[in-house]
Image (cartoon, rainbow, N blue to C red):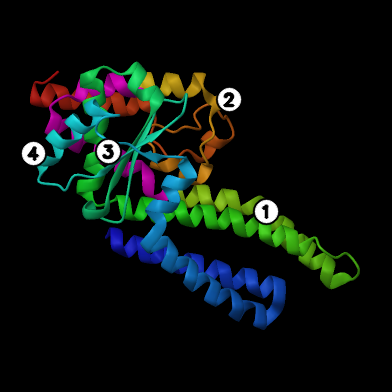
Amino acid sequence: MNYFKTFLLMFGLLVLMMLLGQGLGGSQGMMSFFFIGLAMNFISYWFSDKIVLKMSGAKPATEGELPQVYRIVRKITQEWGLPMPKIYLMESPVPNAFATGRNPEHAAVAVTTAILQILDEKELTGVLGHELAHVKNRDILISTVAAAIAGAIMMMSRMAFFFGMGNRDDDRDRSGNIFGLALLILAPIAASIIQMAISRSREYAADAGGSHLTRMPLALASALKKLQSGAERSYAANKVSPATAHLFIVSPLSGGSFINLFSTHPPIPERVKRLEEIARQIGSR
C-alpha cells in the first residue's frame, strides 16, 4: 500500500509539473516540464533520504559521539531483526527526532542536540522505538518522498512566480503574473495537504508499535509532552523547513497558529491518551 501511495504522489508531481509548463510556455513548456518532472521523480525516489537529511542540517554521528543513541538503537534493531540504520545529529535548540530512507536497508535516524539534553534513558528509548517502528512498518519511503516532493512544490512556486512576474507588457504577461502568484500562494498549502494525508495515522501506529516492543509507553508519553513543550518554547529559533515537518516525531511547527490548520501530527493529548491505554493493556511503565 505504501508503494502505491508513493506512486500516486510521484504521478501527482508529474501532472503538476506539466500544468506548470503549460501555464508558463504552452505545449512546448508542458513537454519540457514533463521531462523535468520525470527527473525529479527519479531523484526523489533514489535520493530523497539524502535530500531530507541535507534540508534538515543533519550530520553523520559516530558511536563515540552518541554512545547512548547507538546503544539503544542497536538493542531495538537486534530484537526486531532490523539492519542497523545510520545515525545522524542535528544541532538544534528544538528537541526532536525523525527517521528517513526508502527501506530498512537504507534507513537513517536523526536526533537533535536538544532532545539528548531533556530526555532520560527511558524516554529516549521510547522515542527511538517510535522512529524504528516507522522503519519496520516501511512507511519511511512515502514520508521521505513526500518531503522531497513538498520541497519541489515550494521550489516550483517560486520559479513560477519569478518567470511569471518577469514581464508586464501585455495580456499574456499579466496572465503569467497571475498564474505565478497563484502557485506561490497555493503551493505551500498543497505541500501541507500532501503531508497531512499520509502522516496522522502512521504516528499512532508508530507509537503503538514502538511501545509494544520497548514496553515503555508511559516513557514515550512523557517524552512527547516534553518535546511538544520544547518545540513551543523554541519555535522562534526553529529552522526546520515545512516540507520536512511531517517526518519528526513531534511537529517542529507547533508554535505557528496558522500552520496548525494543516498539522501533520495528531494532537499530543490524544497520543498520550492512547499510550496510557496501551500501558494498561500490557502492564508496563
Look at label 3 and name its amino acid. Glu
Mark 4, secondary structure of its residue: helix
Which residues make up the magenta segment? 196-224
Mark 2, secondary structure of its residue: helix
Drawn side of residue 172 relative to residue 225, left or right: right
Look at label 1 and name its amino acid. Leu
Q: Which quadrant of the view contains residue 95? A: top left
Q: Of marks 2 and 4, which one's residue comes earlier in the chain?
A: 4
Q: Of marks 2 and 1, which one's residue comes earlier in the chain?
A: 1
Residue under pointer 1: 184
* Crowd band around label 3 with a 10 angstrom C-alpha radius: few (<14), some (14–19), many (20+): many
The image shows residue 45, relative to residue 115, as above or below, that is below
The image shows residue 81, relative to residue 204, as above or below, that is below
Q: Quadrant of the N terminus?
A: bottom left
The image shows residue 226, relative to residue 193, as above or below, that is above
Name the disc covering residue 79, or none: 4
Look at label 2 and name its amino acid. Ala
**Residue 144: x, y in percent?**
38, 52
**Residue 73: x, y in percent?**
19, 35
Q: Of marks 2 and 3, which one's residue comes earlier in the chain?
A: 3
| Label pair 2/4, CB-CB below 8 angstroms | no
**Residue 36: x, y in percent?**
54, 72
Residue under pointer 2: 236
Instruction: Compute the Cα span from label 2 to label 1.
Output: 24 Å
| Label pair 1/3, CB-CB below 8 angstroms | no
